[in-house]
Image (cartoon, coloured by chain):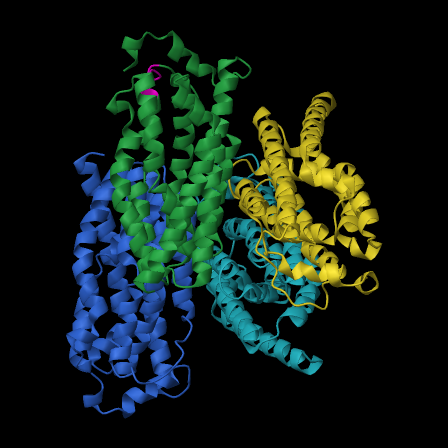
Chain colours: A blue, B green, C cyan, D yellow
């Protein structure tokens, strides 16, 4: 693929990512709440628990692509190497949840919310079937999401007075993902050859980003249900309100 | 696990590996033929074609273990990293086959022999089911096999007047595997805790080594069938006899 | 499980099904369009193509549950028997699409819409992981959906002047599913024992029904995009407008 | 496929089955022991425990073929229907083991022997990869094995004075398999079209039958190790010697 063609393809993906993130950010109740500062630590906890859930599958479904498609050696190698780097990252998300005041409290981690489960299901689906290259569409936006997410995290951090040590997941990923993003573009240039490859990458990119947007909204709905007392699913987060700030770090 | 216990376990594995290799080497018709010098390039070709077949699955079944068992992060990381390093190694085996005089001849690579297929099947089986640690039993002997195999390869090399460039698979693996073997012992020390873990590792070690021995014997039987003209499965190797030595490199 | 407990559980499921169908029917643009009679054959075609896509996976993911959970013999038997009955049903959906005037026209069946792919992905997910009984939640509503769907199909049939021979998918399923629904309740009574079993069944029931609702809405959106000329994805359906009614049967 | 061609193909398979069974029966130490009457109930127990192990996977790997190949509807239906009929048959094998005098004794069922595990592994392998039709090669001989096995079972029955109620696995299968065998030929006639299909069926037939032969021999070796006291793997069978005959039924 010529540089011109490749750059045109990447330009097209970037346009779509920007457009969909725009839709998500503009219509999101979660984003509105974060920007408005009207949130407490329970929101961060609910969000990080879902992050914990889907992150626990990322290395697995990433490697699965290589397992079923090892003929294309450079791509399989990419899949296994990335999987190796992603292993155990969910533990950072869990650490961050616990750090805000839950460490001394026993609770069962709730099952993933339906929208999180749907996202996980979809990522396995695109990994075990169809064009093996299509999962790159997920990596493409996910490893380059911090442009969109960081302002929200910064706002949350100020509002909730979170320490760096309570944001290990986001800080680690901001660092890793800059490198990853370049690697993703390199492997895409090397492997995505046909029109269908780019169509498949774009489809998975859009769908997985929209499913992530739906997950953000469900996090917010659950937060509202929790705050209003209409759902006791997150009853174990009550301790965050009762605990004095000093004890939480 | 204490150093004493670990060393005792490793000592036990080493004893079993030595004993089973002993059985294989002592009774093997293939080994007798190689040692006797009564072989030609067709034998090397048949052997390397089977090596090509099973090697093409090693990265895949290695990664599969991590896909289904990512909770144990260090082990999953090991599986994915090793898989990344093994990707595409079958191409070395194929290169070596082609280099002995087949490069300019079109032929379909024959399907794996039954004993090779059985070995491949077994390695997937131990990778997708049972104790995820058990596949270490295969790695344990396979990444430390050169002590047993190198004398045979050296003999073959002399008999067949092979160049280094026609032995890339074995030369590359001798180098890689020394490191790998240390990594395998490190991860075993870290992960194999229960009695059952060691029993499972030993069972898979023994079974996969014996299946490899059976594959070596079938290679020899096929070679005899080819030489005697009783089977034309490897008819495309006839060119190795006809080609003058100079043209082969 | 006592009759009382079982009936209470089933009553609870029925309440939830009724409530979610109510939400779907009340808010659906597709339903509004069908009820208003403002639809043409293109809508039926788009809908049946998505039906074709997800139906092609139902036997497969149904059997998958039994493959990974054969210890519970009556349930595995149920899974395999149902899978056997569902095999090939997508061909009825395809037949119905073709029968409305597409038979003599060559076209590539478009890939599933994103919401259809998400539904398919989710059904594999609940089939290959988690509580093996949870997929019963999908069967529970899907094999009892005709109460909700038949009035819409009847309305479509009148509006589009469809013959029975153009509705084989729905007519066949209405018949089969009455029996299936009794079998599903029988196997649920026999296998769903724990609180968690019922929670899991209900979660999958709700999520898969909502995903189906989302698919219906995407069908309608695509229909509007097609009618307004904003999307040419379904350009091959233009022939339905041009063809005189007589030629369509 | 014409009747003549089909009958020729079937004739070829039958010849191969007869030849391989001939080899197995002629060289088998197990067969020699049974025919010589020099066996006791421990042999039957060891054999039926291995039968229990591999039978527990037959429905699962049979259905797996349909899961990955549902496009060919009649074959997928065959796979699911056969799987449904095979579910739970391992329980008959276990019942027969227990009935000979183990019912009142607690013991852990030993893991499958290596050769049994290899057979199981191979059957999954031919089910999840390669030509989906190839697994018919296993069914072809396995559902028609009673011609070869029944004389041995009859001899065992006389020697060990077993009741019909202690042979439920074999009696049930003799009945079922006659029907199954006709169904297998019917589906083969319908689906096996290409030369490669028949080659693949024959390869799997031969390999799976030879692996079964190897399992029989390992059963005998284990029996000898048990009788001579060299292995205590089957120590729980000691009770069969001590128990008076009357108590065993």
Splitting the image into 4 quarters, where does residue A238 fall? bottom left
Q: Position of residue B223 (x, y in %)?
A: 47, 20
Q: Position of residue A109 (x, y in %)?
A: 39, 76
Nearer to the camera, C188 or C44:
C188
* Magenta part, dominant SS: loop
On the rendered image, what quadrant is the C terminus of chain A found in? bottom left
Span colored in magenta: B98-104
Q: Is residue A149 visible?
A: yes
Whether B103 is among the magenta residues is: yes
Q: Is residue C224 visible?
A: no
Instruction: Establish if D11 lies above or below C130.
Output: above
Q: Position of residue C126 (x, y in %)?
A: 50, 61
Q: Horizontal placement of B19 versus C66: left or right?
A: left
On the rendered image, what quadrant is the N terminus of chain A found in? top left
Q: Position of residue D154 (x, y in %)?
A: 82, 44
Splitting the image into 4 quarters, where does residue B246 fall? top left
Whether B246 is among the magenta residues is: no
Splitting the image into 4 quarters, where does residue D188 fall? top right
Instruction: Establish if B197 lies above or below D220.
Output: below
Nearer to the camera, A96 or D21:
D21
Count of marks placed on residues: 0
Q: Horizontal placement of A172 versus B124: left or right?
A: left
Q: Residue at x 29, y 55 (%)?
A: B186
Nearer to the camera, D5 or A136:
D5
Instruction: Establish if D203 lies above or below C73.
Output: above
């Amino acid at each position: 693929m010529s540089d011109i063609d490749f750059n045109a393809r990447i330009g097209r993906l970037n346009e779509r990512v920007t457009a969909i993130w725009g839709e998500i950010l503009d219509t999101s109740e979660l984003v509105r709440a974060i920007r408005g500062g009207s949130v407490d630590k329970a929101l961060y906890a609910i969000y990080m628990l879902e992050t914990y859930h889907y992150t626990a599958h990322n290395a697995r479904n990433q490697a699965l692509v290589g397992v079923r498609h090892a003929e294309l050696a450079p791509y399989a190698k990419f899949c296994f190497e990335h999987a190796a780097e992603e292993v155990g990252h969910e533990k950072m998300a869990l650490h961050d949840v616990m750090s805000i005041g839950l460490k001394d409290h026993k609770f069962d981690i709730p099952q993933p919310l339906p929208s999180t489960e749907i996202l996980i299901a979809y990522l396995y689906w695109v990994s075990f079937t169809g064009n093996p290259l299509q999962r790159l569409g997920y990596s493409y936006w996910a490893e380059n999401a911090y442009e969109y997410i960081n302002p929200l995290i910064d706002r949350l951090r100020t509002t909730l007075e979170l320490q760096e040590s309570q944001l290990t997941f986001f800080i680690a990923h901001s660092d890793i993902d800059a490198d990853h993003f370049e690697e993703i573009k390199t492997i895409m240039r090397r492997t995505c050859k046909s029109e269908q490859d780019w169509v498949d990458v774009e489809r998975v990119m859009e769908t997985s980003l929209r499913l992530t947007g739906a997950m953000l909204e469900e996090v917010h709905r659950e937060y509202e249900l929790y705050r209003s007392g209409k759902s006791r699913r997150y009853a174990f987060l009550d301790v965050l309100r009762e605990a004095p700030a000093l004890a939480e770090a």
